[in-house]
Image (cartoon, coloured by chain):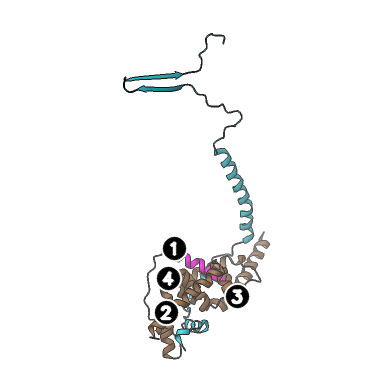
Chain colours: A brown, B cyan
Amino acid sequence: MALADKRREREDAERAAAFWEKLDPSKAKLYNFIRKSLGFSVESDDVYQETVLRAFQYVRTYQEGRSFEAWLFGIAHNEIRKHFRKSSRVPVTIEIERWITADNLPDRILAGEVYRVAENLKPRFREVFFLFYDAEFSIKDISRITGLREGNVKLILNRIRKILKARLGASHGR
Amino acid sequence: MDDKHLSDNDIGRLVRSLELDIPPDMDDRIRMAASGLRPRPVSGRRLFWLLTLPSAAAALVVAALLFLPSRPNPVTQENPVISEIRTDFEIPDKNIRIIFIQRPDFKLFEED
């Protein structure tokens, strides 16, 4: 019995080590996705923590050979949905431009406009937007992560492109 | 950059120009919380559902069969019986109303 316990403990330790190793290159991307999808809410850190802990707990559901990042972001997607279900959406007003690291001023202003458009999107659309443009997932992966059909993902992205075009075109007087 | 024709690459570049750092103590906090957790076994859960789902489905079918109102057998069901036919006549000028009541013949004799 003691031997079996020791073996299980060793297996758990190995699995945990493998998990942290796999998580490491995706951490920043995951954190940014959650914060941006939640409109920079102060609760983003809790959602990030909950996502990582849940992924750790259910690491055995990850199938080797498939994309670890897509699996991880799928968990994040569920946690974000849970967050929106239980808490009322309080818009956060932040000076986005302060954090933007674009080299020149016009790009900084444009990036600010893009974020303002994203801020006003419905949570589901905003997630798709950041999965595509920030986390750089393919439409196929976004479909897997969010459970939306590929056609719907394309439709959402096209609508956002149109909004961006209208908004940026108008705000710059062209 | 022509902002009227922002390409996907342009939008992506603009979006990624805002990158937030993970708070320095976050990793330690998560690892500390994770140390009290154990990865949950999958096989047990799968086995649970494999055993539970068919049993639950069978129980539902049995319950449905028990609570469904039993349908009468169309062969053995008795045909409705017409017990009487009423026919009314009215003669308005005379203020007369005639009512015919047709009933099946009553039994005349006890042994009938």
- Judging from the image, mark 2 belongs to the subunit labelled A
C-alpha gap between disc 1 and disc 4: 14 Å
Query: Pointer 4: what residue?
Result: A43
**Pointer 3 or 4: first along the chain:** 3
Asked if residue A141 can be seen in this view, the reply is yes
C-alpha gap between disc 3 and disc 4: 25 Å
Read off the magenta span: A72-84
- Give the answer, above or below, for where A16 lies relative to A108: above
Pointer 2 local density, CA inside 10 Å: few below 14, some 14–19, many at least 20: few
For image coordinates 43% across by 62% down, the residue present is A86
Residue type at mark 3 is Lys
**Pointer 3 or 2: first along the chain:** 3
Q: Residue B83: where, in percent of width, then height?
A: 48, 21
Give B25 or B92, whichever is nearer the viewer.
B92
**Pointer 1 or 2: first along the chain:** 1
C-alpha gap between disc 1 and disc 2: 31 Å
B12 in the magenta segment: no
Query: Pointer 3: what residue?
Result: A22
